[in-house]
Amino acid sequence: MITLKNEHLTVGINPFGAELSSITDAAGREYVWQGDPAYWSGRSPVLFPIVGRLLSDSYVYNDTKYYLQKHGFARKSAFALVSEDDSHATFTLAATEDTKRVYPFDFLLTSDYSLSGKTLTVKNTVRNIGKEDMYFSFGAHPAFNIEIGDRVEFSETETFKTYLFNELGLADGEKIFAENTNSITITDHIFDGDALFFEDLKST
């Protein structure tokens, strides 16, 4: 585990997946979900080169069929630690023969963590180092320690419309989740239908 630390925060980052694994404040409060495998073992996985799932976990590129797992392979890859001090750490993941078997592109993914005061800044950069167009998506998947009954507050009053997902994890219809509100309360069953996906919100 790589540790960044100042008088306000202590941050732990796992080089496996370049995954943010802990943020604790001076009082010892942990802000990151600690990966209880009874529910979900992740903490803050990096999603690359896809976010979500492909139909049949496969795609065709230049007449060749490739198989790519849900959320891609970065979250299950060992990143190289490029630089490190008390307030900053940089990790990279580059294309290999193994990655090219599922994703035939030359890439360099850099994950940079910087701690200043009470703020942790995370910057991810994807570089195409090949000669052809490179197709990808990228996502962050942070999980936070919260309690049932806590609320997520938005800056504007919204109508929240979300996709419905089938048993394969693929979008299959839509529904109104909540109307004319600026907050969502966390309940035991809020994620029974999988992820909540809100588009076109006015809130910042």
Image (tube, rainbow, N blue to C red):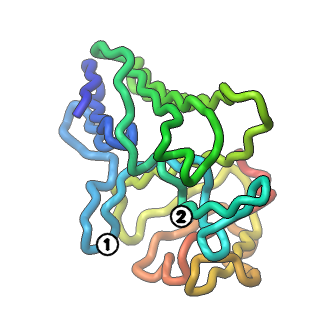
Tell which of 160 and 4 is nearer to you. 4
Quick one: label 1 or label 2, which is nearer the N terminus?
Answer: 1
Seen as rendered, the residue at the extreme left is 28
Q: Position of residue 157 (x, y in %)?
A: 74, 60
Image x and y of residue 167, in percent: 56, 86
Q: In which quarter of the image is the N terminus?
A: top left
Residue at 50% x, 76% y is 191
14 over 161 or under it: above or below: above
Q: Can residue 61 be seen in this view?
A: yes
When asked about the image quadrant of residue 127, the answer is top right
| Furthest residue in direction front, as rendered | 63
Tell me which amino acid carries mark 1.
Answer: Tyr
**Circle 1 residue:** 39
Question: Quick one: 50 or 94, which is closer to the camera?
Answer: 94
Residue 203 badge:
none
Task: Give the x, y percent position of residue 121.
Answer: 49, 27
Residue 136 vertical position relative to residue 172 in the rendered view, above or below? above
- Given contact means CB atoms under 8 Å apart, are the residues at marks 1 and 2 in contact? no
Which residue is at a point 32% across and 35% down the rendered structure image? 15
Q: Which of 19 and 150 is in front in this view?
A: 19
Kind of element beneath mark 2: loop
Query: Where in the figure is residue 153, as x and y percent of width and height?
Result: 58, 56
Q: Name the residue under label 2.
A: 70
Please report the residue visible at 35 percent of the width from the left and 57 percent of the height from the top.
Answer: 42
Q: In which quarter of the image is residue 150?
A: bottom left
Q: How far apart are marks 1 and 2 (CA)?
A: 18 Å
